[in-house]
Amino acid sequence: MRLASLIRGEWSIENRDHHVRDVTLGEDRCRVRTGSLPSILAVMRSHAIGTLRLLGFANIADGTRWVRDDFHHPLIALGLTN
């Protein structure tokens, strides 16, 4: 039972992360497939998700809209401008 619980917990994290990457950030629609660019884009998506979570966004789609609506929002939040 404990093993099954651990496995379910691991898959829930994986499913949550994949859902954000696929639905919100469109990772599966990305047509980049060769060279190092797919890995670079994956790292950039991970950093974007992590940064939005650090800024307090539980909903990454809300966070991306917040960034999109005013480019100064993230710069102010990260202390890069006034």
Image: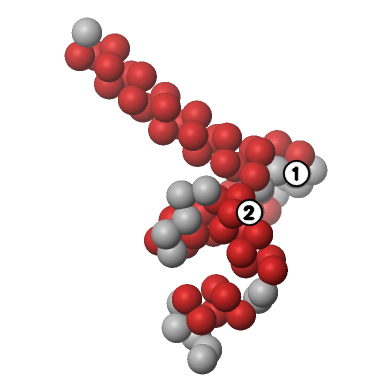
* Identity of the residue furthest to the top in this view: 1
Mark 1 surroundings within 10 Å by alpha-carbon count, few (fewer than 14), some (14 through 19), many (20 or more): few
Task: Tell me whether circle 2 and circle 1 mark residues in contact (CB < 8 Å).
Answer: yes
Left or right relative to 48: residue 53: left
Q: Residue furthest right?
A: 31
The structure's colour scheme is: secondary structure
Q: Quadrant of the N terminus?
A: top left
Q: Amino acid at mark 2?
A: Leu
Residue that lies at the very extreme toward the left in this rendered image: 2
Residue 15, position in %: x, y? 50, 29
Reply above or below: 49 against 82.
above
Is 37 left, or right, of 6 in this rendering? right
- Residue at the spot x=70%, y=43% of the render? 26
Residue 41, disc: 2
**Looking at the image, can residue 74 be seen?**
yes
Is 9 in front, or is 37? 9
Secondary element under disc 2, as helix, strand or loop, is helix
| Residue depicted at 66% across the width and 47% down the height | 25
Q: Visible in this render: residue 40?
A: no
Q: Secondary structure at mark 1?
A: loop
Q: Identify the amino acid type marked 1.
A: Cys
The quadrant where residue 21 appears: top right
Whole-percent x, y for residue 82 in the image: 51, 91
Q: Quadrant of residue 63?
A: bottom right
Q: Of the two numbered discs 2 and 1 on the same chain, state the one appearing first in sequence.
A: 1
Estimate how packed mark 2 is, as few (under 14), some (14 to 19) or many (20 or more) residues with alpha carbons within 10 Å.
some
Residue 32 position in % (x across, y down)? 76, 46
Query: Label 1 belongs to which residue?
Result: 30
Please state which of residues 57 and 21 is positioned toward the viewer in this rendering.
57
Q: Which mark is residue 79?
A: none
Above or below 20: residue 46: below
